[in-house]
Image (spheres, rainbow, N blue to C red):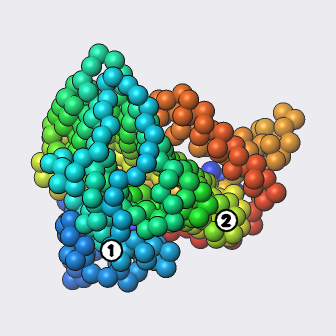
C-alpha cells in the first residue's frame, strides 16, 4: 500500500501532517483502514519498491532518461559521468582510526562478502558494482568493548570513480563505524552493512565534501536475528549528493533506526531514498530525517519506502521526514510510501511535513531579549540537533553542530521571514 498527497508549506507556524486520504467509493481496502491510497481497482501498472529489478551488471539497466520514478528529481547532467560506466574502481587512499576490536583491509573484487547485503537496483549502483577492482572490508569483532572506528576519505579528486565497502559486525559485536567523506569527488559507490545475530552497530555516512563534489551512494544493510542497526546519513557539503540506504530486516527480532540530517544551500541538490523491508516476524523500524534549506535553487528530495511483507507479523514501523524552509527559492520534495501485505502487525505509519519558522518560538525567544537573527539561528539549530544527538559519538556530534552553525553563519544575511509563496513542496503523510 502506498500513499501520496500534496501540500504546500505553511506561511507560518510549525510543519503540519496531512490527513489520511480516504479511498474512493468502491475501493475500500482491507487491513489497516486508517491508511489508504485508493485506486486498488486501477488498471495502470504500478511498480512497488519491492519489485524493482536487481543486478550487479550495468547492462541490465537501460539508459536513464529522467522519467523513471527513482530518477525524476535528479540533475542527470551532473550525474551523467557516473551513469555511463567505465569508472575507475581501484583502491584509494584513506585514513582509519586504530582499534584492536576492528579490522580495515583491502579485499579483492571477488571478495565473498560482496553481495551479502544486497544488489544494485539502478544504473548508478550497477556501474560502480561492475567497475570495482578492490573492496574495502571493515570488520567489527565481538569483544567486551564498544568499538569505534572512523574512515576518512579525502583523496578521490575529479576523476569519475567507483568504490565498494563492506562493513561486517560479527555476532554479538557492538560498535560504531563512521565513513567521513571530504574533499572533491565524482564518485559512485556501494556500501554493504551486515549486522550479525545479537550485534549492535551504529553506521554513519558523513558527506562533508567540497562544494564541487558529486556523490552517489547506494547503501544496503542486512540485520540478523535480535540484532540492532542505527543507520545515520549526514549530508552537508557537496554539489550533488544522492544517498539511498535500504535495510532488510530478514530475521526475527531485527531492529533498525534510520536517521538523517541535511542542510542544503543555494544551488545544492541533496537526495535520500530510504527503504525498510520488514521481512520477518517481530521486527521494528524507525525512520526520522530532518533537513533545512536556504538560498536560491536549494533542492532536497526525501523518498521513504516501507514494506511489511507477508512474513512480517508483529511489525512495528514508523517513518517521518521534516523540512525547515529558511528562504525564498528553495524546494523540498518529500514522499513517504507504505506497503503492507499482512494485517497482523503492531503498528505502521508515516508522516511528512515542510514548513517555515514557528512564529511562537521566535516570539518566545525575542520576548526574552534575544535578537531576531539569533533567535532564528537557535530555532534551526534545535530543529537539526535532535537528530545529530542520536549518533552517540560526542566528538562527531560536536563537529556536526559546529558545521551547522557555520552553514547558518554563512547564510545569516538571508535568514529573514519568507513570503507565503516561498517553497515548492511535494509531500505526503498519514498515520496508519
Q: Residues within 10 Å of mark 2 (few under 14, many from 20)?
A: some
Q: Secondary structure at mark 2?
A: loop
| Residue 52: x %, y % from top left | 22, 68
Residue 259 x/y as whole percent: 44, 44
Q: Position of residue 108 (x, y in %)?
A: 22, 51
Q: Which residue is mark 1?
A: 85
Residue at coordinates 24% horizontally, 24% vertically from top-left?
142
Image quadrant in which you'd find residue 329: bottom right
Does any portion of residue 368 appear in the rendered image? yes
Q: Residues within 10 Å of mark 1 (few under 14, many from 20)?
A: many
The alpha-carbon separation of the residues under discs 1 and 2 comes to 30 Å
Picture quarter with the N terminus: bottom left
Question: For mark 2, what is the residue?
Answer: 266
The answer to whether 106 appears left or right of 424 in the picture is left
Please give left or right for residue 134 compared with residue 148 in the image.
Answer: left
Residue 144 location in percent, x, y?
Answer: 29, 16
Against 133, residue 95 (above or below) is above
Judge by depth and name the residue closer to the eye, 31 or 251.
251
Amino acid at each position: 500500500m502506498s500513499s501520496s498527497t500534496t501540500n504546500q508549506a505553511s506561511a507560518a507556524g510549525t510543519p503540519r501532517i496531512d490527513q489520511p486520504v480516504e479511498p474512493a467509493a468502491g475501493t475500500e481496502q482491507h487491513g489497516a483502514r486508517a491508511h489508504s491510497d485508493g485506486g486498488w481497482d486501477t488498471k495502470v501498472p504500478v511498480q512497488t519498491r519491492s519489485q524493482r529489478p536487481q543486478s550487479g551488471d550495468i547492462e541490465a539497466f537501460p539508459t536513464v532518461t529522467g522519467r523513471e520514478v527513482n530518477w525524476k528529481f535528479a540533475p542527470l547532467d551532473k550525474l551523467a559521468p557516473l551513469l555511463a560506466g567505465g569508472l575507475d574502481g581501484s583502491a584509494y587512499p584513506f585514513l582509519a582510526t586504530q582499534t584492536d576490536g576492528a579490522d580495515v583491509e583491502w579485499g579483492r573484487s571477488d571478495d565473498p562478502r560482496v553481495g551479502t547485503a544486497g544488489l544494485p537496483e539502478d544504473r548508478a549502483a550497477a556501474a560502480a558494482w561492475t567497475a570495482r577492482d578492490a573492496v574495502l572490508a571493515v570488520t567489527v569483532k565481538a569483544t567486551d568493548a564498544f568499538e569505534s572506528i572512523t574512515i576518512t576519505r579525502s583523496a578521490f579528486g575529479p576523476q569519475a570513480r567507483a568504490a565498494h565497502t563492506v562493513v561486517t559486525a560479527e555476532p554479538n559485536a557492538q560498535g560504531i563505524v563512521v565513513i567521513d567523506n571530504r574533499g572533491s569527488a565524482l564518485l559512485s559507490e556501494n556500501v554493504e552493512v551486515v549486522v550479525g545475530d545479537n550485534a549492535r552497530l551504529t553506521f554513519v555516512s558523513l558527506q562533508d565534501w567540497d562544494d564541487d563534489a558529486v556523490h552517489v551512494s547506494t547503501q544496503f544493510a542486512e540485520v540478523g536475528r535480535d540484532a540492532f542497526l542505527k543507520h545515520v546519513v549526514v549530508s552537508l557539503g557537496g554539489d550533488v549528493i544522492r544517498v539511498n540506504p535500504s535495510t532488510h530486516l530478514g530475521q526475527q527480532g531485527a531492529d533498525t533506526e534510520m536517521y538523517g540530517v541535511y542542510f542544503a544551500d543555494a544551488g545544492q541538490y541533496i537526495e535520500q531514498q530510504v527503504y525498510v523491508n520488514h521481512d520477518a516476524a517481530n521486527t521494528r523500524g524507525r525512520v526520522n530525517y530532518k533537513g533545512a534549506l536556504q538560498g536560491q535553487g536549494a533542492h532536497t528530495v526525501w523518498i521513504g519506502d516501507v514494506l511489511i511483507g507477508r512474513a512480517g507479523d508483529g511489525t512495528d514501523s514508523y517513518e517521518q521526514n521534516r523540512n525547515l524552509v529558511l528562504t525564498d527559492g528553495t524546494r523540498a520534495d518529500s514522499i513517504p510510501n507504505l506497503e503492507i501485505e499482512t494485517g497482523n502487525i503492531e503498528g505502521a505509519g508515516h508522516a511528512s511535513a515542510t514548513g517555515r519558522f514557528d512564529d511562537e518560538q521566535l516570539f518566545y525567544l525575542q520576548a526574552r531579549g534575544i535578537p531576531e537573527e539569533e533567535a532564528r539561528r537557535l530555532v534551526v539549530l534545535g530543529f537539526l540537533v535532535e537528530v545529530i544527538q542520536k549518533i552517540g559519538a560526542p566528538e562527531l556530534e560536536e563537529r556536526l553542530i559546529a558545521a551547522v552553525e557555520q552553514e547558518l553563519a554563512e547564510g545569516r544575511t538571508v535568514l529573514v521571514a519568507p513570503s507565503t509563496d516561498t517553497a515548492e513542496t511535494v509531500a505526503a503523510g498519514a498515520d496508519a
